Amino acid sequence: ESAMGPDLVCITSFWTRDPTGGALHLRGSGEHTHFFSDPNCCSACEAGHYHGDDPTHEPKQDIVYEGYFTLAGEIARVRDAVAEKLSDTGDKPTIAVLGAGAMGCLLGGKLAEGGLDV
């Protein structure tokens, strides 16, 4: 059984296009939803992603959603899973930059920007 709920809280974002021309790596679906159950009203702790209702579920049933949406004034990406996956080439080494000079700071900063533990 894959059914979850009822009474799930969903946090959804909709978009019509990537205003950065693709730099945000937004999905082509124009939608992304996370959900969770309220532990104060449900005995099961459920959470995950919602990607649409299951059209093969039997018996067929009507599903009702209630949504409240507002338009955003700006968009920001906190983590970029696409960029993280592309840069994931295995274990990254820990690097120590010795010396407090400007060049050490520059190199340490650049390595840290690249995702290394400096």
Image (cartoon, helix red, strand yellow):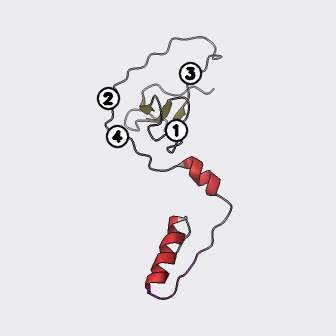
Q: Which circle, 3 or 1, is nearer the viewer? A: 1
The residue beneath circle 4 is 74
The CA span between labels 4 and 2 is: 12 Å
Discs 3, 1 touching: Cβ within 8 Å: no
Q: Magenta stretch: give its range.
A: 94-101
- In front: 9, or 70? 70
The residue beneath circle 1 is 26
Three-letter amino acid code at disc 2? Thr
Badge 4, how many Cα within 10 Å: few under 14, some, many 20+? few
Quarter of the figure with residue 105: bottom left
Q: Which circle, 1 or 2, is nearer the viewer? A: 1
Seen in the picture, residue 65 relative to 110 is either above or below; the reply is above
Residue name at image x 56 percent, y 31 percent: 28
Three-letter amino acid code at disc 3? Asp
The residue beneath circle 2 is 70
Discs 1, 4 touching: Cβ within 8 Å: no
Residue name at image x 59 percent, y 11 percent: 60
Q: Point out residue 30 in the picture as x, y percentages from the top left corner.
A: 50, 29
Q: Point out residue 40 in the picture as x, y percentages from the top left corner.
A: 37, 37
Q: Point out residue 41 in the picture as x, y percentages from the top left corner.
A: 38, 32
Q: Which of marks 1 and 4 is nearer the N terminus?
A: 1
Q: Which circle, 4 or 3, is nearer the viewer? A: 4
Q: Earlier in the sequence, mark 3 or mark 1?
A: 1
